[in-house]
Every structure is written in C-alpha cells, then in structure tokens.
Amino acid sequence: MAILKVTDLKIGYNGTTVIDNLRFQVEEGDYLCIVGENGTGKTTLIKGILGLIPPYSGQVEYSDGLCRNHIGYLSQQQKVSKDFPASVSEIVMSGFLNNKVISFGYSKKEREEATRIMKKVGVDSYVKKSFSELSGGQQQRVLLARALCAAKKLILLDEPTSALDPLATADFYSIVKNLSNEGMAVIMVSHDVMSAVRNATHILHLSSDSYFFGTTHEYMHSPFGSKLIMPQCPCDACAHNTKKGVVTDA
C-alpha cells in the first residue's frame, strides 16, 4: 500500500505553475530519487509534499498511518556559526519536538531511540561534541539523525550531499540505502544521476514540459534515462550496472 500518493498535482509560486499534472506514489521501503534540470520544480515538489506550498489543484495524500508530522526532512547543507553552542545529542534529540504539542523534556524511550539512530548513522562516538566543531560530512549525518527522530515511515532529502566531498557523499549514500533496505521510504532530490541509478529503486525525472516516473531499470531504458546513461552493452544495462557508463549531469 502506498504511504504517499500524488495525483494530478499542479503547483507553483505566485500564480506561476512549476509542476503540472504530476502523478506518482511511494510505498514502504521505496527509495525514490528526483532528478532533472534546474528550475523544473524538484524543491517545489518537496515543499508541496511537506505542505509548505498549497497545490493549485490535484492532491498529495498520506496513507497507511502516515501524517505530515511523521515525515523527516533534511534540506541542503547550511553553514553553521562557529559559536553555535548545541551538542550533537541536543541537535539529534530536537527531532522529537516535531511530534510534541507541549515539551516537558524527553522520555526514556526517546533517549533510547536517539541513541539507536545515532549509532545507525555513525555519530555515536561524538555525541557530546559541539555541532559546530564537526566536519561538513559529520554535520550532515547529525542532521540526518535528527530527521530520523521525526520520521516514522518517510524521510525527504533535498540535495543533502551538495556541499560534501566525494568520500563523505559515498558514506551518506550508503547510510541512506541501508535505511531504505530496512523499510524506511526515502525521497531524495539529487543532481547525481549516477548515484541515483546505483542506489534508488525508483526515479522521478522532471523536465520543463513532461516527466518520467518508474523503476530505476525502466528509467535506464526510457528516453529520459537513455540521454544521460549510455551503457557499453545491453547486458550492462540489464544487470543494472552503470559503472562503465557515461552520465551527464541533470
């Protein structure tokens, strides 16, 4: 059963339509990468899913027990002031505040869950450190842990690796893929098409006048994917192996 269903969505800003007649759905454990040229509405769509922008028409529906407050969200990496005082554990625990009407501190269950999540994403060894002392890759993993504290079944990631070096990017993608394998639904906006086809189960490719939605395998053989991914032989493509392919930035 789909936990998120987008039907005939028309959305934009200030009366200008950015996305029109969009349809797709996400099920538990799906790893959907949203790719496409700049200005085609990738971030707009994320904001629409979060309810930050109302649609002109169409619907964004949550099902299977999912509600908006139970969606984790991680935006593009932001610069943090060097004197930002919060510790890693404080940053991560703040993810639970999204689901609290009134805060009276954190429960034992929440503290145990935060510890489990920090270990999962590899930040448990520096929980007492100041967030501002960490590297960019470490900070982004901390923010991912915070988003996971808010998430129940779905997490949205808007170009989370755009400011990271290649090693930190590879580590981040590995963590996210493991989350998907464990049943968390993931929607990630990315310009890294190669990583998208290596890791995602589904691709949503937005363009100025149309879109593609389907499995990664279907995308690689579609007119959208074939323009970006050119395997050396059909066997490579059918095996979902793009290591020898050529990818141009979307």
Image (spheres, helix red, strand yellow):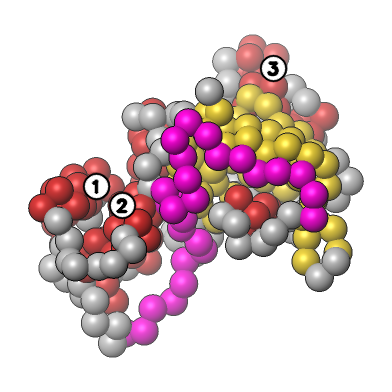
Residue at screen point 74% across, 22% down: 221
Pointers 2 and 1 in contact (CB under 8 A)? yes
Q: Residues within 10 Å of mark 2 (few under 14, many from 20)?
A: many
For the residues marked 3 and 2, what is the alpha-carbon distance in whole angstroms? Answer: 43 Å
Q: Amino acid at mark 1?
A: Ile
**Closest to the observer: 245 or 85?**
85
Chain part drawn in magenta: 56-82
Residue at image coords 29%, 83%? 84
Count of numbered marks = 3
**Residue 121 within the segment the image draws in magenta:** no
Q: Earlier in the sequence, mark 2 or mark 1?
A: 1
SS type, badge 2: helix
Q: Nearer the viewer, mark 2 or mark 1?
A: 2
Residue 49, label in figure? none
Q: Which one is in front in this view, the residue at disc 3 or the one at disc 2?
A: 2
Q: Could you tell whether 8 is left or right of 94 in the image? A: right
Q: Amino acid at mark 3?
A: Cys
Lateral position of residue 165 relative to residue 132, left or right: right
Please report whichever mark, 1 or 3, sits nearer to the chain's N-terminal start: 1
- Residue 233: assigned label: 3
**Identity, as a three-letter code, of the amino acid under mark 2:** Cys
